Image (cartoon, grey):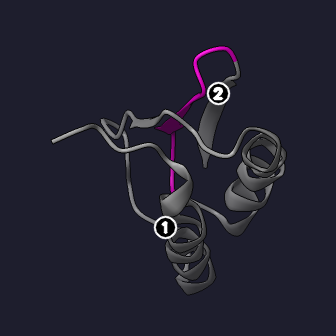
Amino acid sequence: MFQFTLDKNQADFVIQPTGPLAEADFEASGAEVNPFIETNGALKGVVIDAAKFSGQEGFGAALDHFRFIRDHRRHIARAPS
């Protein structure tokens, strides 16, 4: 399980795991962040506060985690190098 916040003014997505990640977590966060990306093109950043990360709640949740990363990584602005 994780809590998430989408700061629409700053275009930042903050994720805070509070227990094992479940498939429903990715469905809920995707429902929040996908319309924002469709409208605005990208996020400026993603912050993951993983101090309490304890893994996934089964193989299905792990697959959803990897799919979420795959599907969203191109929609996050990168810092200039």
x and y percent of residue 9 in the render?
67, 14
- Determine whether, in the image, residue 16 is placed left or right of residue 22: left
Q: Quadrant of residue 5?
A: top right
Q: Where is residue 33 shown, x and y percent of the image?
A: 73, 44
Q: Name the image quarter holding residue 39.
A: top right
Residue 18 covered by magenta stretch? yes
Depth check, front residue: 52 or 64: 64
Provide the secondary structure element on which disc 2 rests.
strand
The numbered mark at residue 5 is: 2
Which residue is nearer to you in this view: 10 or 62? 10
Give amino acid for label 2. Thr
User: For the magenta stretch, what is the residue range?
Assistant: 9-20
CA gap, disc 2 to disc 1? 20 Å
Residue at 59% over, 43% down: 2
Q: Residue furthest left?
A: 81
Count neighbours of disc 2 (C-alpha within 10 A) and say few if under 14, some if 14 to 19, many if 20 or more.
Answer: some
Seen at 58% across and 76% down, the residue is 67
Q: Which residue in the structure is indicated by mark 1?
A: 56
Q: Nearer the viewer, mark 2 or mark 1?
A: 2
Q: Is residue 7 above or below residue 24?
A: above
